[in-house]
Amino acid sequence: MDIKELLRQYASGERNFIGISLNNANLIGINLSGANLSNSNLRNAELHGANLQRAILKGVDLEGANLRYAMLDEADLSNADLIECNFQYASLKGAKLANYKILESSLEGANLEGANLENADIVDTRFEDTNLTNANLSNAEIVETSGSPELRLAILCNTIMPSGHICNDNCNPAAIKDILLQRYALGERDFTNNFSCVELRLSDLRGADLSGVQLPGIKLWNGL
């Protein structure tokens, strides 16, 4: 299937494109939101700025693809092969990346807020300024990666780390307060090992009812 036929069918309402081959295709800015591209060959495809929100990309081959500034919010990339991919500044909010393999790629500046990366295999991949707020990296294997194993160059806020502990190393005060209140409302009282090297002003928690909470990793001070 060529690009012209793909766009024609998509415009007519077709969303099932399982197993198509578009390697080396120029797909800059293409809109395939909601399309099912499972097990497709997108090697070396140019997908800069593409709209793939809510797309099903299970098992897709994206080796060498450029997805810089692409929109992949809530896309399903489970079991995908992402080798030498460029995801710089892409949006993957709420994306499903469980069991995927990413090798020698860049997620620099990408937004993976709320993404599921359980059991992912992450090797030699850049995470500078990657937003991993509320992301789940349970049991992910991270090797030779910038900031490995704690991804210190990424934004970690209510992030479930590979070990299972929750990391909040660089949340802003407003985000930490929201996390505390949300989890307190759900009945949690012991936040031991959930925060490290975090400082909050007492004014940041003004009006918050946190009676009985254990916050050993948070330093509270009276500064304005």
Image (cartoon, rainbow, N blue to C red):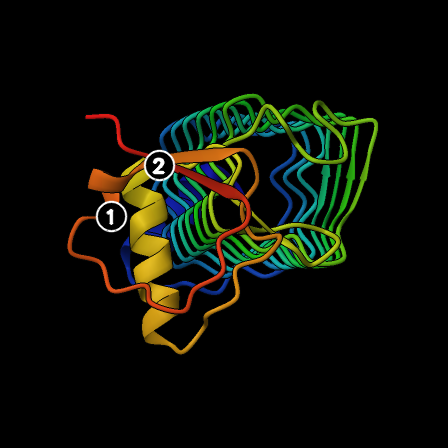
Q: Assess disc 2: are there few (<14), some (14-19) or many (≥20) residues with their C-alpha within 10 Å of its C-alpha.
A: some
Position of residue 163 measured from the top left corner of the image (x, y, whole percent) = 75, 54
| Above or below, 168 relative to 191 | above
Q: Element at badge 1?
A: helix
> Disc 2 vs disc 1: Cβ atoms closer than 8 Å?
yes
**Which residue is at a point 61% across and 27% down the rendered structure image?**
127
Q: Is residue 186 left or right of residue 168?
A: left
Q: Is residue 87 left or right of residue 104?
A: left
Q: Amino acid at mark 1?
A: Leu
Position of residue 64 measured from the top left corner of the image (x, y, whole percent) = 69, 26
Q: Is residue 159 left or right of residue 224?
A: right
**Which residue is at a point 28% across and 53% down the rendered structure image?**
11
**Which residue is at a point 44% across and 36% down the rendered structure image?**
111
Between 6 and 29, the one lying in front of the other is 29
Between 128 and 99, the one lying in front of the other is 128
Mark 2 to mark 1: distance in Å? 8 Å
Q: Which residue is mark 1?
A: 205
Q: Residue 122 falls in which quadrant of the image?
A: top right
Position of residue 116 measured from the top left corner of the image (x, y, whole percent) = 57, 57
Q: Residue lying furthest bottom in this view? A: 187
Give the mark nearest the N terminus, 2 or 1.
Answer: 2
Identify the mark at residue 200; answer none if there is no mark: 2
Q: Quadrant of the C terminus?
A: top left
Q: Amino acid at mark 2?
A: Leu
Between 207 and 174, the one lying in front of the other is 207
| Above or below, 25 relative to 119 | above
